[in-house]
Structures are given as C-alpha cells and as structure tokens.
Image (tube, rainbow, N blue to C red):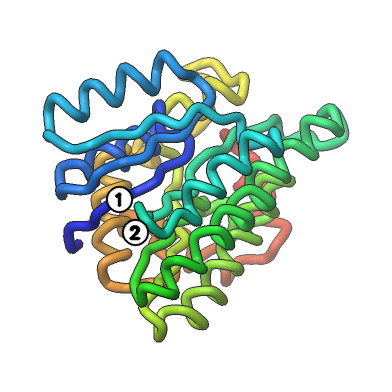
Amino acid sequence: MCVVAIALITGASSGLGAEYARQLALRGADLVLVARDRDALEEHARTLRRRYGVAVEVLVADLLKPRKRAQVEERLANREHPVDILVNNAGFGLPLAFERNDIDDEVAHLDLHVEVPMRLTHAALGPMLARGHGRVINVASVAGFTPRSTYGACKGWLISFSQWANGVYASRGVTVTAVCPGFTHTNFHERAGLPPGQEGVPAWMWLDARTVVSQSLRDVARRKAVSVPSLKYRVLVALARLAPPALVARAAARGR
C-alpha cells in the first residue's frame, strides 16, 4: 500500500483501531486519532510519535453526540489539511437477545454502526473526489454475511454500502472497502459484557489483530470492495451463502 499523507481513524484508542494506527504510521502516514478516552488517545499518540516519527493529532469525540461528531466531519472536510484515508472503526457489541436488550442501547448501536460511518464517509468524499484519490475503510464483520441479530444487520448494511460506493467512486480515484474479520483478539468482546474465555468459540477461529489489519490493507491497496482476512473465514463465508438460513443462524449464535 502506498504511503499516504494523513489517515483519520475512529475508535483509535484500542483494538483494531489502534492497530490500524500503528501499521499506517509504519507506512509513513500522519494520523488523526478519534475516540472518547482522552488519556488512552494521548498515550497512544505519544508512542506513535516516538516510535515512527509521524505527526499525530488527537480528536476526543463521542461520535454519538452530534456536536462532537460534527467536529470530526469538519476535520474530514478540511481541504487545506486533507485526509487521504478514513478508517471507520468505532463500534460496540450487544448481547444477541434483541428482545431483552434496552431499545435505546439498540438505537445507539444502530447509529454508531450505520449513521456515523455514513456521515463520515460523506464528509470525506467531497475533498477526496476533488483531489482524485482517497481510501475509505469500513470495518464490518463476517457477521454481516449471516443472520446475527442487529449486529449482523448493521454490518450487512455497511458491506452493501461499501460495495456500492466502491463501484461508483473507484473510477474517480476513491476506493471504499468493507473489512470483514471474524473473531479477533481485541477488547471488543469484553466491552460487550462477555468475560474472556466464555465466548464459546473454538481457539482455531480466533484471529490476531495484526494479521487482520495487514491483510486488509493489502486488499485496500488492491482496490477491493470487500476484504475477508484469512482463508478460513473466506471459506466459512462461502459455505454460509450455500447453507440453509436457519442452520446459519444457529451457528452464528455462538460467541459475540
């Protein structure tokens, strides 16, 4: 993947977001890190500046709050200091039992996984198209290919949107890629309220964040609309498309 000027990453304080920051900094990109936790962001920024010698901006924002989200949109729309790569990574999980979940939590979950990346992508597209180059990376999930409560539905929307946008904008120099990892070792499952070791997922199904990010960046460089890191998950996705929906739904109920 070619060196870029500036990459803006949401959910950048931990997990896949932090790993995208590390790997893009290694490639020479300056960074704009977005998350809610100022202390974690500042610590990560200091490490990246020291280790890779890149410039790092810190933008503290809860993307579910319109005024804070607007600050991120304004940064993306800034044509004097343009963003070359947008990584829509912020997200959280909920228990799969929709009927027992708080509906306000479900609405916030929908907003963060659908409305927020849509708004940020829209803000980034104008300047990217004007310059004739740019990359949008939407972190989705293999859950988007399976019936899996509202999480799968949100990620399915993100995959479909990315496929459409890549088809429309790639010829104008801007690619959009949905990255669809499987179960990955981050703090995502812990934040969803599931204690470590109780996910009910076999060890062989787990991926490493470093591998997910490196393989996805390779696919982004190849201008792919969808990236499914690891051969085993590409095989599982292919099988899921052939299996009866009820069987897929039962299999997808394992883990978070």
Left or right of residue 161, residue 208 in this image: left
Left or right of residue 113, residue 168 in this image: left
Left or right of residue 124, residue 80 in this image: left
Image coordinates of residue 90 in percent, x first then y, are 53, 39
Residue 34 in view in this figure? yes
Q: Is 67 placed above or below 222 here?
A: above
Provide the residue designation for mark 2.
Answer: 84
- The residue nearer to you, when weighing 108 against 140, is 108
Can you name the residue that lies furthest to the front here? Answer: 80
Image coordinates of residue 47 in percent, x first then y, are 21, 22
Provide the residue designation for mark 1.
Answer: 6
> Image point 54% across, 48% down: which residue?
74
Q: Amino acid at mark 2?
A: Asp
Q: Amino acid at mark 1?
A: Ile
Asked if labels 2 and 1 touch by Cβ distance under 8 angstroms, the answer is: yes
Image coordinates of residue 219 in percent, x first then y, are 30, 65
> Image point 57% across, 69% down: which residue?
241
> Image point 48% across, 47% down: which residue?
75
